[in-house]
Amino acid sequence: MDSLSSLNAFVRAADTRSFTAAGRQLCVSSSAISKAVARLEERLGVRLFHRSTRSITLTPEGSLFLERCRRIFCEVEAAEQEIARTQDAPRGKLRISLPLVGMLMMPTLCAFMRAYPEIELDLDFTDRLVDVIDEGLDGVVRTGDVSDSRLMSRILGTFRFKLAAAPAYLAQRGTPERPSHLMQHACLHHRYANNGKLERWPLRRSGKDGAKDMEWPVTAAANSIEPLIYMAEQGLGIACLPDFAIRRQLADGSLVALLDDCIEHEGAFRMLWPSSRHLSPKLRVFIDFMAQHLFAV
């Protein structure tokens, strides 16, 4: 057991590239992690990490040893899961990070909670860049491409952006027939929470419009989607919104889609989780449920 503890300390330090972060995950001090790795190095007779005052990096021997250790823990985890599958339904705490637009996923999340009452959801809504491994998360839901080779991913669903406005607004201000007409309209923008920049409206260049090069008027900006939907419904302007977020409003006519032929962007929500871990039963059912129900009509 002491050997397994040392191996676990080594793997956590290698994954997080930090004795301090590894200690936080294992609820021990950074010096305890450092000593465990040092004992392991002494027993093996090799150096596993290059150490500096600011960081640690794996040696070639450390990289080779890490892959073996991951296989060991994967086998242990697989054995535990095999036993767990013979027992009751998936259970335990599930720590998931979702984007701020994740509030619009609440109907699906609530349905999941009703379907799996033994799973305790611990949800973090943020648009900041999180480190799944360092922060001890089971997984994150994000849009965009995956750039971290330490993570596995699965697409939960795709969406398109739509320009939308209330019928009352269009009756008063007119309906834009080409992108350049938006210069005479009230525009409601999404602002990225992590950098403060306005999200670009994905309008295709049309003839002499040069839509990609234009900066549209800013009547209001918000760092989450819900206020923009509300303002658009109140007839205060035109907003660029993901279609899944305004499906009800488009169906009941409280919002009208505009310039659909000029929208060029399609996005995807992805579930990301550490590649070094077996997919636990609780995370597996969460991913399957979200993929099946998140964008179900």
Image (spheres, grey):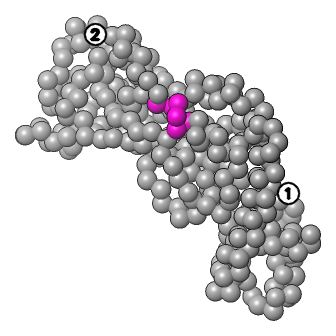
- Judge from the rendering whether residue 3 lies leftward or rightward of residue 137; answer left or right: right
Amino acid type indicated by mark 1: Cys
Q: In the image, what residue type sits under mark 2? A: Pro
Q: Residue furthest left?
A: 208
Residue hosting label 1: 27
| Residue 291 is inside the magenta segment | yes
Q: Place residue 184 in its image quadrant.
A: top left
Say which residue label 2 marks.
167
Residue 68 in which image quadrant: bottom right
- On the image, the x and y values in percent for residue 26 come to 83, 59
Q: Secondary structure at mark 1?
A: loop
> In this view of the protein, can residue 137 be seen by the observer?
no
Q: Give, as a single range, the part of the protein colored magenta.
A: 290-295
Quadrant into which the N terminus falls: bottom right
Place of residue 59 in the rendered image (x, y in percent of width and height, measured from the top left): 66, 85
- Mark on residue 269? none
Secondary structure under badge 2? Answer: helix
Measured as percent of width and height from the top left, residue 67 is found at 67, 75
The residue shown at (7%, 40%) is: 208
Label located before the other in sequence (2 or 1): 1
Determine the main secondary structure of the stretch shown in magenta: helix
| Rendered view: 102 above or below 153 | above
* Residue 63 spot, x, y in % from top left: 65, 80
Q: Can residue 60 be seen at all in this image of the molecule?
A: yes
Return the residue nearer the eye: 198 or 84: 84
Marks 2 and 1, how far apart at CA: 56 Å
